[in-house]
């Protein structure tokens, strides 16, 4: 069995340097607890000498339960013109009372001479003095040798001398930093090997992702003998980000014999990634390796046909190992396997109908629909191919009128003639907008036959213009998401008339619900179980009785995005 690799997380310090991220004190404490529960070895909490929030973090983090995780305070080596014992930054690091202190020190002659504006000899004293002070105070000391790989190219003897100065002062870890993110894996491996040949102090690595190689570089360093890997959850950080600890852990745990404390929690990896993204107010990357929702999504027909026979044929690991799941996507590229597996997930048997359904999908997408993001439309196509399918209703006529007089928009009026079995209903309804009016008119006609429609709510409405160069004649794609209790489904419509596209998506949404309603396995939920906290459900409309020619006051709720 290979040695253990220590995971050092710097999400709260280096990750917070990503543009657009600003962790509150509570955010930092929540993430700390998540990381500790997951088994991360060291959490770098911030720079206590840089701002009051980080100083307060180090006071409050002591109250958390972190039995298997150590907290590190980060800061720089002493200033050239100060003694270590009087340097304000070093004193702030001691005041943080963390078991681990990480000191960033220059190891590139270029930075020593042009950024610090000091001599090489004085920089060695700065490193040695700073580390010695922390060791005298009983701290575990990590030296982050900034710009080490660039410095090694400039002058390898001097870069090594910087590490030697820290080692002689008692540093516990010498972390080699690819600060500009410009190194290649082969270079990283060679430099780590060279350092290990000269020094016995344990080596770590800290890589940035400017060349999109931070994970590869970190793994190369481990293979060359590094035993600490620094990075952030989801790879967040300044510029192009840091090494992604999510991918590093998954690779180490599943593809090597190296041991990591957090490997025992690997099945929670996807949850950790998404929780940190949520706290950072970032949308999770759907295409992130291992943990993205599309990491194990299969769209091509040949691929799906293969995984139906052998899952490992197109999956490098079982997605459940990292807490993720498999997706089978249906689109114009779908084959019979896509249809069969996706339908099976819906509890539907399509044996013998796969080819016809696949052709129907291709025709639908050819005219502008996009079914991979409209699960309800796919399910409706499948149900329409079921033996004995009968349309639960037919829309014979649909008309909507909207007007603006003297700059004031009037309510839209929709009329609908709907046939259910042998009976026709002619209804009308007014609403703030045309689509909401259509929805109200259709429901009014259908509710006498399907009263459960009272519990269906429209929760989202999205529009995309497919050919903007056509200006007002452009083709429009409309998605409508609906909900009933905990069920959610999305349908799509497409037309060069936005009202027609909306009506198509809306009618399909209602038909799918009714077909589900007629399924033997459908359990109708009482109206009291339907969530009422959907913020967008605030628009009000008034029904209009076509036959009697008057308004009456029953109000409905619908999605105001449809107005």
Image (spheres, grey):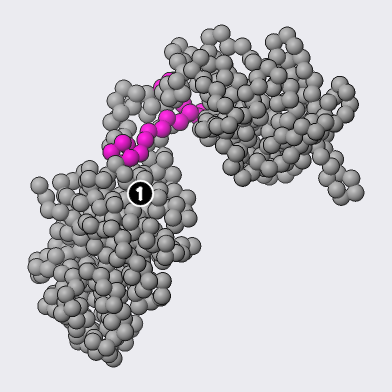
The answer, for residue 215, to whether it is visible in the render is: no
Question: Magenta segment: does it hold 419?
Answer: no
Task: Residue at 11% x, 50% y: name it.
Answer: 2
SS category of the residue bearing label 1: helix
Q: Give the mark count.
A: 1
Spot occupied by residue 303 in the image (x, y as percentages of width and height): 37, 29
Question: Which residue is at the front of the view, 210 or 485?
Answer: 485
Residue 421: quarter of image: top right
- Depth order, front residue of 369/489: 489
Q: Is residue 96 above or below residue 183?
A: below
Kindly identify the residue that appears in the image at 44 percent across and 55 percent down: 279
Q: Is residue 16 above or below residue 34?
A: below
Residue of label 1: 272
* Position of residue 491 in the picture relative to residue 273 (left or right): right
Which residue is more in the foreground, 154 or 526? 526
> Which residue lies most toward the front here?
528
Q: Position of residue 447 (x, y in %)?
A: 69, 22
Q: Give the residues drawn in magenta, as a range.
A: 319-340
| Quarter assignment of residue 368 | top right
Identify the residue at image location x=60%, y=39%.
532
Nearest the camera: 511 or 204? 511
In which quadrant of the rendered image does the C terminus lie?
top right
- Based on the picture, tell me whether residue 329 belongs to the magenta stretch: yes
Q: How far from the left and from the top, in percent, is residue 415?
A: 80, 27
Q: Where in the figure is residue 195, as x and y percent of width and height?
A: 14, 67
| Residue 307 occupies quadrant | top left
């Amino acid at each position: 069995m290979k040695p253990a690799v220590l995971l050092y997380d710097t999400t709260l310090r280096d990750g917070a340097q990503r543009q657009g991220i600003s962790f509150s004190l509570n955010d930092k404490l929540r993430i700390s607890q998540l990381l500790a529960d997951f088994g991360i070895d060291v959490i770098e909490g911030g720079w206590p000498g840089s701002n009051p929030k980080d100083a307060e973090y180090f006071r409050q983090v002591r109250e958390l339960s972190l039995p298997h995780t150590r907290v590190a305070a980060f800061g720089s080596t002493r200033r050239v013109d100060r003694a270590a014992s009087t340097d304000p930054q070093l004193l702030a690091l001691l005041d943080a009372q963390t078991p681990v202190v990480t000191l960033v020190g220059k190891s590139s002659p270029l930075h020593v001479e042009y950024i610090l504006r000091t001599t090489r000899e004085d920089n060695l004293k700065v490193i040695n003095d700073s580390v010695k002070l922390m060791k005298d105070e009983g701290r575990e000391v990590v030296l982050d040798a900034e710009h080490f790989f660039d410095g090694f190219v400039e002058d390898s003897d001097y870069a090594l001398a910087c590490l030697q100065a820290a080692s002689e002062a008692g540093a516990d870890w010498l972390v080699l930093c690819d600060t500009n993110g410009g190194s290649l894996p082969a270079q990283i491996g060679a430099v780590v090997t060279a350092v290990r040949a000269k020094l016995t102090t344990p080596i770590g690595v800290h890589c940035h992702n400017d060349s999109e190689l931070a994970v590869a570089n970190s793994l190369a360093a481990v293979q060359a003998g590094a035993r600490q890997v620094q990075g952030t959850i989801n790879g967040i950080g300044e510029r192009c980000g840091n090494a992604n600890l999510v991918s590093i852990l998954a690779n180490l745990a599943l593809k090597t014999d190296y041991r990591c404390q957090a490997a025992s929690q690997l099945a929670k990896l996807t949850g950790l990634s998404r929780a940190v993204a949520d706290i950072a107010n970032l949308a999770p990357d759907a295409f992130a390796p291992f943990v993205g929702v599309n990491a194990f999504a299969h769209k091509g027909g040949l691929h799906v046909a293969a995984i139906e026979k052998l899952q490992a044929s197109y999956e490098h690991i079982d997605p459940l190992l990292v807490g993720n799941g498999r997706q089978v996507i249906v689109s114009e590229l779908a084959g019979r396997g896509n249809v069969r597996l996706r339908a099976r997930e819906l509890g539907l048997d399509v044996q013998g109908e796969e080819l016809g359904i696949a052709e129907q999908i291709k025709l639908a997408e050819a005219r502008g629909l996009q079914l991979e993001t409209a699960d309800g439309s796919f399910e409706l196509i499948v149900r329409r191919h079921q033996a004995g399918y009968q349309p639960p209703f037919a829309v014979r006529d649909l008309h909507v009128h909207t007007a603006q007089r003297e700059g004031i928009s009037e309510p839209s009026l929709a009329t609908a003639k709907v046939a259910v079995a042998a009976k026709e209903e002619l209804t009308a309804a007014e609403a703030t907008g045309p689509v909401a009016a259509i929805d109200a008119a259709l429901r009014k006609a259908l509710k006498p036959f399907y009263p459960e429609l009272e519990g269906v709510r429209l929760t989202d409405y999205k529009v995309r213009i497919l050919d903007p160069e056509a200006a007002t004649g452009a083709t429009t794609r409309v998605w409508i998401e609906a909900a009933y209790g905990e069920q959610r489904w999305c349908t799509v419509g497409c037309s060069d008339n936005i009202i027609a596209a909306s009506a198509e998506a809306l009618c399909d949404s209602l038909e799918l619900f009714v077909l589900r309603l007629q399924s033997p396995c459908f359990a109708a939920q009482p109206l009291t179980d339907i969530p009422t906290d959907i913020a967008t459900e605030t628009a009000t409309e008034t029904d209009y009785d076509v036959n009697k020619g008057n308004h009456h006051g029953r109000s409905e709720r619908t999605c105001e995005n449809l107005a």
